[in-house]
Image (cartoon, rainbow, N blue to C red):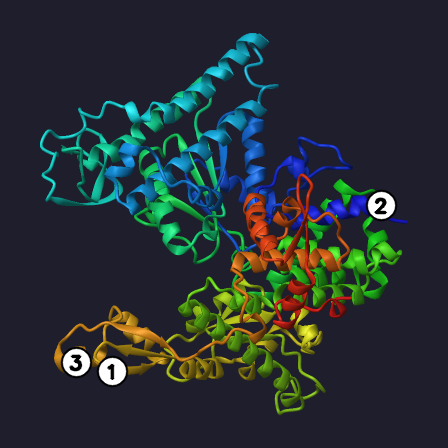
Amino acid sequence: MYNVNELNSMVETLKLYHRINKDKLLVNGIIDPDIIEKIYVDALPNNALLKKVLLKNTTFLVGKRGTGKSTIVARAQHQIRKEKNDLSVYINAKTVFELSKGTTSLSADIDQILNGRELNQLIILKTFLDEFSKSLKEELQNENNSMFTWLSRKSRDRKIKSIIKKIEQIFTNRASIDVSKRVDKNTKNNIAKATTLGAKTKIDSNGIISPEIDSQIKKNNERYIETNEVFIKYLDLNNLILKIEEIVDTCRRSGIYVFIDDYSELKVEDRKMFTEYIIQPFYHIAKDCVFLKVAAYPDQIEFGNLESKKYDFISIDMYDIYGKTNITDLEEKATIFTKRLIVNRLSNYTSIQIEDLFDFNSFNSSDECFRYLFYASMCIPRELGIIMDNCLQSHVFHGKKVNKTALIEAAERAYRENIESFYSRKLAATDIDSNEKAELVLQQELITLLITIAQENKKALAGIDNSYFRDLSEVPTSHFRVNKEYEEILAPLEFNNYIYKLGELVGKGSSKGLSNNTETLYSFNFGLCHTKKINYGKPIEKDSKFYQQRALNYSIKVGDLLSESKSISCEDGHTFGIEDLSLIQSLGMKCPTCIKEKGKLVSCKEVRKINFDRPSVLEEVKWTEAEISILTAIYKYEIRGKENITASLLENEIDLTSYSIGKRCQRLAEDNFVLRTHKSPYSYSLTKESRQLLNNAGIVAKADNLI
């Protein structure tokens, strides 16, 4: 009845991780060069998001995992190639740092001059430039059949070869750059003199770019070497930009877009370094011809000294796109977007009609069907792909249409398989520091508290003297509110898809001394609600003020949990409750008691009261967070009956490159947690021991619960 390959292709394109190219979007096994244009669905009318990304400025494209950042990047690059007015390159920030870790030396002279931190910085920069060169060469080579069509083939090939050679010269000639004219004659220092360094670029009155220094001068064979010279050679951005401009001019283009992906996958210190040493210099020096486009997660961006009014910040999360005050309007627009995604993929990847896939008779209307799909995915294309994949396995491949029950069961499975064990997976890792673990434990307790309140209110609120509840035997409690001051503490739960932010409203009175009267409306994950027996939504006959009822504000109980788990303490021993955090932050995290009584500016810090013990079954196991992600992904594929699980396949499931996955699987195999078949590429499976450990530690949902 159904073409399995077509349907699999459809859902897999919704689930893609990392860079998206035409090779990952095959239609019946054939490459369609325009497929990304055909399947792209902008969240706003007239491709408004795409057009904004294509503006010639620095842009931060911000959204949670799976919201479609990589798809927008792929669509933007396709448009750039199609119009041939500019060039583009794609760089994965996480790959840059992973590759740089495998390099420990630049040259004998440089290694002796720089300390470890400086050497690491230069290695990262060089790796970035190497990836830049590699991506640009790929883009040029891909244009072989369309570029310089007015030239003969021989002339065209010679031109492209010359362009690629110039790219390589950026690196091979860098060390021989004559920098004597840029270094003041008095900059050579005695060995005892220290200067401050940081590779922060600055521009002098003559327009010459040079770095600030944060290094100790080192003596080498009785020669005094000024580290300025080394950094000017390696950070000679003037020369780099001139070469890039030359390449752009040679290609008869006006500029070059640099798309930077997986930026927020870097650790905080690495993000700061990436911004300081890569984003800032290009932003300040080359903004007329180099247009940076950085894909990032909310609240995981280090802006450095970038001027906020001179770059675009584009959020593609549902809450920011479809409005913050009218939940009804948001749901209508989000449902339309969800329907467009499904219809578009079906028409491009299958010959199936929408009514042949969905059993609309099991819903009140076809609109209700797509509203359920929206509830289950919350405008996150990757989540929609997971839901549809579950439906294919449970119903479609057995000759059944997708009905309401199928969607609910698919959402439950997605929650149990991908979300419910998130904190167990994180806390089982050995490479997470104690502060982060304490925060994770707090988040785990917080979601447990919110679920418990919702479960209790389902019965407790029924029949009370309230026009919105009195005629109900069970109250839908999937939506709740907290004072806006608690948004920051709930942000990790939202980022990890336990809850979703839907709107803001003015409360009927702040509680427990909270200064802000604005409240934020959230909903629980649709699959979570059905798993935990929480009724979703609101009664059809009730208006949207249902969500504004005072009983659905959980601020007091959230505040109580925070007070029990956190406190604030100053260096002189004064202790404050977490409810005083806003006051202390307004004082620059200085102790108000010390200021008042002693006139002293004494620093305060948050003190966590929660401890965590790893599951006893993992006492002898030293899995890292990345390794747990790999093991979990293999487990998921195995319970779905997938064979030949390769690093490339796993790359589609987790935020790691196939190169990184392969390296880690080698170590896991050496420790007898993974089996590798001796093929090229390797195929991976779990050993009995690792499967038992994953189950007993609660890291994965047991297979019998996912059927």
Mark 3 vs 1, N-terminal side: 1
> How many neighbours does mark 2 have within 10 angstroms: few (below 14), some (14-19), or many (20 or more)?
few
Q: Where does residue 546 sit, x and y in percent of width and height?
A: 61, 77
> How many neighbours does mark 1 have within 10 angstroms: few (below 14), some (14-19), or many (20 or more)?
few
Q: CA distance from mark 1 to mark 2?
A: 68 Å
- The residue at the point 39 percent across, 50 percent down is 271
> How many neighbours does mark 3 have within 10 angstroms: few (below 14), some (14-19), or many (20 or more)?
few
Q: In this view of the protein, can residue 445 be seen by the observer? A: yes
- The residue at the point 66 percent across, 47 percent down is 649
Q: What residue did someone put label 1 on?
A: 574
Q: Amino acid at mark 3?
A: Lys
* Above or below 11: residue 127: above
The quadrant of the image that shows the C terminus is bottom right
* Above or below 105: residue 158: above
Q: What residue did someone put label 2 on?
A: 3
Q: Secondary structure at mark 2?
A: loop
Mark 1 vs 2, N-terminal side: 2
* Above or below 429: residue 303: above
Q: Amino acid at mark 1?
A: His
